[in-house]
Image (cartoon, helix red, strand yellow):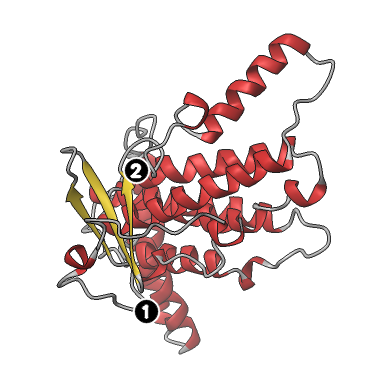
Amino acid sequence: MGRPIENAQGVDISSALAGWDYQPGEVNVRLIRGNDGRRKIQLRLDLGLLQMETTGRPDGKRPHNCASELDYQLRRKRAFERKHESAAPFLISHADVRALREESGMYYHRYVSFFVLGDYKAVIRDTQHNLDIFDLCRTASRNLSDRSALEHYRPHVLMMQGRARACAALKHHYLGSALGYLRGALKQIEHCLSQDPRHPIDIKYSAEARVLMHLIQDIKRQLPTDPREELQQLLTKAVQTENFEEAAALRDQIMAMETMCSVERPASPGKHGRRHRAAPPGDSTSDAAPPRDNPSSQA
């Protein structure tokens, strides 16, 4: 346990908190300009605040003279594999896993803050950092508990990364791309939930999956409707009400449209497919709030 600092001068943070009240249930975050001239993130907590660097490791440190603890362990892994080739697997200790868990907690707070600030590129970067930590712990830890220590956080990180990719696409009104990112994240979550043979979770009970499915439905409502689908709905209604004259006319219209589409088919879209344009929905930040059990709280 560290010794308390007595009579320290100039460390009272009251002035930094003045006029910035904590709002329960919200992610209270702001960007500031630090004394060193660099931008920094401040995250308001009930008893104070967290201050993080916007690039590099959030606490500004360079463990083992590397950009991050993850970077250090990956360098060790590459050096080990060059030396031993395939003779033995690279393994990390429990202390290494603990250091990686602590680091993932820092990046977790920062990617949630970046999401609220609308810096989706930074969210993608920081969530990938944590996914890489999870992968390393899962494959290189010496014991089972360390290999699975961070896996229950994976759905949340995948959800946040998928949302960030989708929001970045929506900034350019690319609804098709946004749907692709959300569906891809949903499949990844479904896969990781099914990997635990002891406690497999149905995706419909996953809070992260429900957030993505809700966003998918919101975007799908903005996609342009196919005229043939509208005619098909009218046809179904006409048949149900036994309005056969109208049903016959609707069938003729549908057949005529299908014939025209087959004869006058437009040129194939480019490599990335057609992108539908529409006004992006408002970005909700309520779902960005982290779960109560974050990596740093159990490190």
Drawn side of residue 193 relative to residue 245, left or right: right
Drawn side of residue 34 relative to residue 213, left or right: left
Q: How packed is label 1: few (under 14 Cα within 10 Å), some, or many (20 or more)?
A: some
Q: How packed is label 2: few (under 14 Cα within 10 Å), some, or many (20 or more)?
A: some
Which mark, by number, is residue 129? none
Q: Residue at x 55, y 49 (%)?
A: 102
Residue 24: % across, % down: 35, 79
Q: Nearer the viewer, mark 2 or mark 1?
A: 2
In the rendered structure, which amino acid carries the disc numbered 2? Ala
Q: Residue at x 83, y 20 (%)?
A: 88
Residue 30: % across, % down: 22, 58
Q: Residue at x 38, y 63 (%)?
A: 220
- Residue of label 1: 246
As drawn, 13 above or below 91: below
**Label 1 secondary element:** helix
Which mark, by number, is residue 122? 2
Q: Residue at x 61, y 60 (%)?
A: 298
Q: Nearer the viewer, residue 165 or 180?
A: 165
Residue 2: % across, % down: 52, 54
Q: Quadrant of residue 80?
A: top right
In the current view of this chain or complex, which residue is farthest to the front?
A: 7
Residue 139: % across, % down: 73, 37
Q: Quadrant of residue 35?
A: top left
As drawn, 288 above or below 118: below
Tags 2 and 1 touching, CB below 8 Å: no
Q: Earlier in the sequence, mark 2 or mark 1?
A: 2
Which quadrant of the rendered structure holds the C terminus? Answer: bottom right
In the rendered structure, which amino acid carries the disc numbered 1? Glu
